[in-house]
Image (tube, rainbow, N blue to C red):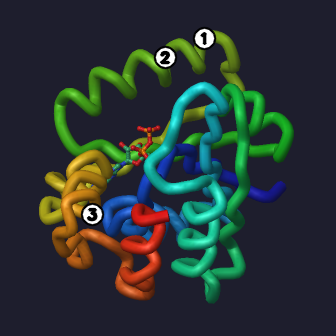
């Protein structure tokens, strides 16, 4: 049976920290679906279309990776696509406490789905989408925190639109 994992997140924007978690997980699974969470009641900084386009660009040469949009619970998405694993990255103890609660509640409700954690690489620990949004918003250069293939001009244009 195919081992399918879902990597859920808002990815607003997708950073080198996210990219690293996905690439390091690739040998463990047959397929990884990056699930971009959509919340109609919450305004994102970058549009859902841009976020999906950027992630697809990052993994355009990786056949094992899919990018999909989902509104609602991650576990419902996992069932829909036949995934038994939820992938998450851990940076700090506060990430751990937050993730622990969600993973344990999910496990109680859906025992067949395992949440799998990868510790971030030390150099990615401070990479945080909120800080990157702030840098971009104020016209700073966030390129060192973003996947190298992304076109930064597009980031800038997006906030000017
Ligand atoms: P969410 O809004 O669901 O927390 P994010 O887009 O912020 O979504 O993050 C998605 C996943 O990526 C989470 O598991 C988060 O802990 C992880 N992550 C975020 N930044 C990093 C990083 N710099 N290094 C490793 N993992 C990260």
Question: What is the C-alpha distance between the residues marked 3 and 2?
Answer: 35 Å
Residue at x 41%, y 65% (from the top left corner): 160
Q: Is residue 155 placed above or below 43 in the rendered structure?
A: below
Quarter occupied by the N terminus: bottom right
Q: Which mark is residue 108?
A: 1
Q: Quadrant of residue 19?
A: bottom left
Place of residue 105 in the rendered image (x, y in percent of width and height, measured from the top left)? 53, 13
Residue at x 71%, y 49% (from the top left corner): 69
Q: Is residue 86 placed above or below 26 in the rendered structure?
A: above
Place of residue 8 in the rendered image (x, y in percent of width and height, measured from the top left)? 56, 44
Q: Residues within 10 Å of mark 2 (few under 14, many from 20)?
A: some
Q: Is residue 103 placed above or below 88 in the rendered structure?
A: above
Q: Are marks 3 and 2 in contact (CB under 8 Å)?
A: no
Q: Are marks 2 and 1 in contact (CB under 8 Å)?
A: yes
Q: Are marks 3 and 1 in contact (CB under 8 Å)?
A: no
Between tags 3 and 1, which lies in front?
3
- Secondary structure at badge 1 equals helix
Place of residue 113 in the rendered image (x, y in percent of width and height, measured from the top left)? 66, 31
Q: Is residue 47 left or right of residue 130?
A: right
* Residue at the disc numbered 2: 104
Q: How many numbered marks are there?
A: 3
Q: Residues within 10 Å of mark 3 (few under 14, many from 20)?
A: some
- Secondary structure at badge 2 equals helix
Residue at x 17%, y 69% (from the top left corner): 140
Mark 1 residue's CB less than 8 Å from ligand 1: no
* Residue at the disc numbered 3: 136
- Secondary structure at badge 3 equals helix
Question: What is the C-alpha distance between the residues marked 3 and 1?
Answer: 40 Å
């Amino acid at each position: 049976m195919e081992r399918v994992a879902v990597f859920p997140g808002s990815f607003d924007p997708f950073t080198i920290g996210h990219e690293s978690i996905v690439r390091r997980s690739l040998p463990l699974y047959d397929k990884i679906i990056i699930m971009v969470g959509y919340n109609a009641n919450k305004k994102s900084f970058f549009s859902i279309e841009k976020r999906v386009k950027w992630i697809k660009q990052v993994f355009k040469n990786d056949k094992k990776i899919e990018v999909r949009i989902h509104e609602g619970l991650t576990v419902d998405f996992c069932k829909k696509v036949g995934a038994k694993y939820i992938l998450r990255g851990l940076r700090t103890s506060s990430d751990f406490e937050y993730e622990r609660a969600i993973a344990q509640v999910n496990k109680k409700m859906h025992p067949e789905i395992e949440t799998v954690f990868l510790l971030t690489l030390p150099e990615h620990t401070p990479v945080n989408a909120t800080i990157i949004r702030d840098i971009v918003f104020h016209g700073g250069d966030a390129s060192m925190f973003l996947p190298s293939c992304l076109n930064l001009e597009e980031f800038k244009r997006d906030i000017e639109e």
